[in-house]
Image: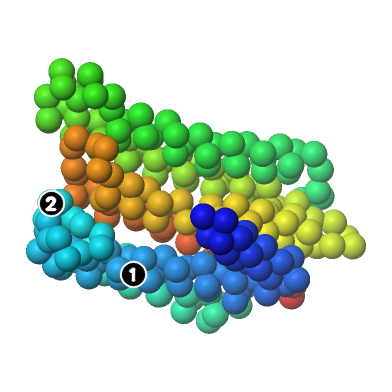
């Protein structure tokens, strides 16, 4: 356990330092590349028959795998656009306390969205026994939609925080926001949610179609990373 924590901390520190030192495009490509690999992994996983004991990551219900491959293709296109586009840099807003408020609000919204959505995904045992399966499925779908919406709003707040700049350091807040985003592994949130929805032995209900919908939140994450990375380049 300690080794895993050290590895995770080392990976977070490396990504954060890479953003702070100006390796924005390379680091963003690596973060998006993780989403590509995770989508491909889930796509291959759902190609196999469900409920097989030899699988180290069991899938209890069948579901189509093509949404995961489509998402992986879209993320690959984002990486290509990241290196082909040549945006212009400009100083938009003078950095102030408002940008740090946007940063704190975005981080708080990002974390609270996950915990609030989990109330829909994993009901209590008493509620699971008293409410019908159709109602539980509808609530799980509503929780997933709430997760995507909350994530998108939080990313917008983080982007607003990244708009702050100064004459001495025109890309000060942009690099700082990306560094904080990478340090706390916030780009991995869609992968974490998809993992919880697929493999949760304690949950009485299994919704095989929701992981692909939850993993599609990589799209707003990718848009945020692309836009913020573009703005951090000096012309």
| x and y percentages locating residue 66 in the rendered image | 19, 66
x 39%, y 40%: residue? 147
- Answer whether residue 118 is visible to the viewer in this image: yes
Within-10-Å neighbours for mark 1: few <14, some 14–19, many 20+: many
In 3D space, how far apart are the residues under numbered discs 2 and 1 (Cα atoms)?
Answer: 22 Å
Mark toward the start of the polypeptide (2 vs 1): 2
Query: Which of the 4 image quadrants contains residue 141?
Result: top left
x 27%, y 55%: residue? 212
Within-10-Å neighbours for mark 2: few <14, some 14–19, many 20+: some
User: Foreground: 16 or 148?
Assistant: 16
- Secondary structure of the residue carrying tag 1 is helix
Query: Which of the 4 image quadrants contains residue 207?
Result: top left
Question: Is 206 drawn above or below residue 47 in the view shown?
Answer: above
- Answer whether residue 229 is visible to the viewer in this image: no
Which residue carries the number 1 mark?
72
Residue with the most extreme right position = 168
Which residue carries the number 2 mark?
61
Horizontal relation, residue 13 to residue 60: left or right: right
Query: Which of the 4 image quadrants contains residue 183?
Result: bottom right
| x and y percentages locating residue 204 in the rendered image | 19, 35
In this view, the mark in front (2 or 1): 2
User: Foreground: 119 or 148?
Assistant: 119
Question: Is 12 drawn above or below residue 142 in the view shown?
Answer: below
């Amino acid at each position: 356990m300690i080794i895993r924590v050290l590895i995770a901390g080392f990976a977070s520190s490396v990504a954060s330092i890479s953003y702070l030192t100006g390796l924005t495009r390379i680091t963003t490509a690596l973060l998006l590349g993780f989403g590509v690999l995770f989508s491909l992994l889930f796509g291959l996983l759902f190609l196999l028959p469900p409920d097989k004991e030899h699988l180290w990551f069991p899938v209890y219900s069948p579901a189509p795998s093509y949404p995961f491959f489509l998402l992986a293709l879209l993320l690959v296109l984002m990486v290509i656009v990241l290196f082909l586009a040549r945006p212009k840099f400009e100083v938009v807003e003078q950095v102030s306390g408002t940008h740090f408020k946007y940063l704190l609000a975005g981080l708080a919204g990002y974390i609270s969205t996950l915990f609030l959505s989990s109330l829909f995904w994993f009901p209590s045992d008493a509620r699971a026994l008293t409410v019908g399966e159709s109602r539980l499925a509808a609530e799980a779908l509503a929780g997933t939609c709430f997760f995507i919406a909350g994530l998108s709003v939080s990313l917008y707040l983080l982007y607003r925080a990244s708009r702050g700049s100064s004459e001495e350091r025109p890309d000060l807040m942009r690099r700082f926001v990306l560094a904080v985003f990478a340090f706390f592994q916030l780009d991995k949130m869609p992968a974490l949610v998809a993992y919880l929805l697929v493999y949760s032995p304690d949950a009485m209900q299994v919704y095989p179609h929701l992981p692909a919908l939850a993993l599609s939140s990589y799209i707003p994450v990718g848009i945020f990373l692309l836009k913020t990375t573009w703005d951090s380049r000096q012309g």
